[in-house]
Amino acid sequence: VEKAVNRDNSIYVEKEALKQEMKKWKFPLHFIDFETSTVALPFTSGRKPYEQVAFQFSHHIYNDDGTIVHKSQYINNTAGEFPNFIFARALQAAIGNDEGTVFKFATHENTIINAIITQLEESKETDKDNLISFLKTISKSTKNQIKQWEGHRNMVDLCKVVKDYYYNPYTNGSNSIKAVLPASLNSSEFLKNKYIQPIGNLKLTSQNFPSSHIWLQMEGDKIINPYKTLPPLFDNWNETELEDNISDIENIADGGAALTAYAKLQYVDMTSKERNEITQGLLKYCELDTLAMVMIYEHFKYDIINE
């Protein structure tokens, strides 16, 4: 309130508390983002109305030497296939081989993991015990679970870290990653100097963008929100435009375009060209979600903690 009244655009940080929080994190750091769907009429037989379907994830690794690897990704674009158990196996292969800290942004990923655990318990999958055991290491139980747990690698909610320790007026009061990312870019000399360069010049890999791609683009003296530089995902609306138009619908902002695109992928009469275009668009959006988390981490590390 004081910053708004005084038109003060400087960031405010609980620096010492943030520093202590960051000391708990173990390398390599894993940044993950899920894309999911929940519909009244299930896309696959034998499933329940409004059941959680996890059809995509992206995964970046930040190593202690500063190298950033877009390590893995998963997407299901096959009409009529229930993806959740395949998704869980791919996630285990991606982040189940070390003790590095795992990051999410908001509570969504934990909710989805709990839903998959319940689905596995009710399933006849031969490896369900192994998958459940792994999923419990990176999550904590919701109030709906009979048995309570909290895994030793329970995911760190980067959104909660932002809420607890960091205030940036450029977010305009939003804690969405699509607001925190451009706010961080506007406030960070480190990010500006780094991401104004092509991917190929950085210690960074990408599975969906060419080495010539530049993440930080300018319009005059203003930074363009990286999400707005991506191609339209659905009916010529990009992610932020879709959210602007349907933001009053509960739970659909932050991923609304992905949800809609996945629903479209369930059309069995779609051409392979159209299916591939939507798939590539989804992969690019999800990759940016996890890279955005990496950038926010770098902003904290190099601009605020400065260590």
Image (cartoon, rainbow, N blue to C red):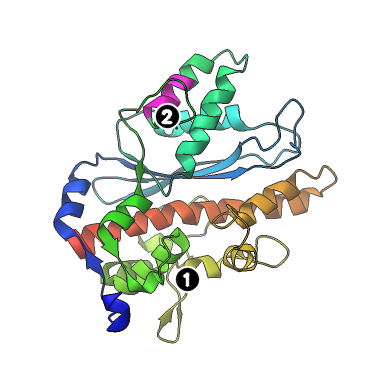
Front-most of residues 99 and 142: 142
Q: Residue furthest bottom?
A: 220
Image position of 201 (left or right of 241): left
From the image, tell me which residue sits under label 2.
141
Image position of 175 (left or right of 301): right
Three-letter amino acid code of the residue under disc 2: Ser
Above or below 93: residue 287 = below
Q: Quadrant for residue 254, please give it.
A: bottom right
Would residue 136 be counted in the magenta stretch?
yes
Image position of 239 (left or right of 146): right
Above or below 306: residue 57 = above
Please state the horizontal and vertical placement of residue 8, each as a whole percent of the image.
Answer: 27, 81
Please state the horizontal and vertical placement of residue 268, each as a whole percent of the image.
Answer: 82, 42
Graded by Cα atoms within 10 Å as few (under 14), some (14 to 19) or many (20 or more), the crowding at tag 2 reads some
- Identify which residue is drawn at 48% across, 57% down: 288
Separation of disc 2 and disc 1 at Cα? 35 Å
> Between disc 2 and disc 1, whose residue precedes?
2
From the image, tell me which residue sits under label 1.
225
For the residue labelled by badge 1, is the local secondary structure a helix, a strand or a loop? loop
Front-most of residues 204 and 131: 131
Please state the horizontal and vertical placement of residue 116, each as a whole percent of the image.
Answer: 55, 29
For the residue labelled by badge 2, is the local secondary structure a helix, a strand or a loop? loop
Graded by Cα atoms within 10 Å as few (under 14), some (14 to 19) or many (20 or more), the crowding at tag 1 reads many
Front-most of residues 271 and 76: 76
Residue 307 seen from this side:
no
Q: Quadrant for residue 242, please give it.
A: bottom right
Residue extent of the magenta highlight: 132-137
Image position of 307 (left or right of 93): left
- Identify which residue is drawn at 48% across, 67% down: 226
Camera-nearest label, 2 or 1: 2
Q: Quadrant for residue 12, please give it.
A: bottom left
Three-letter amino acid code of the residue under disc 1: Asn
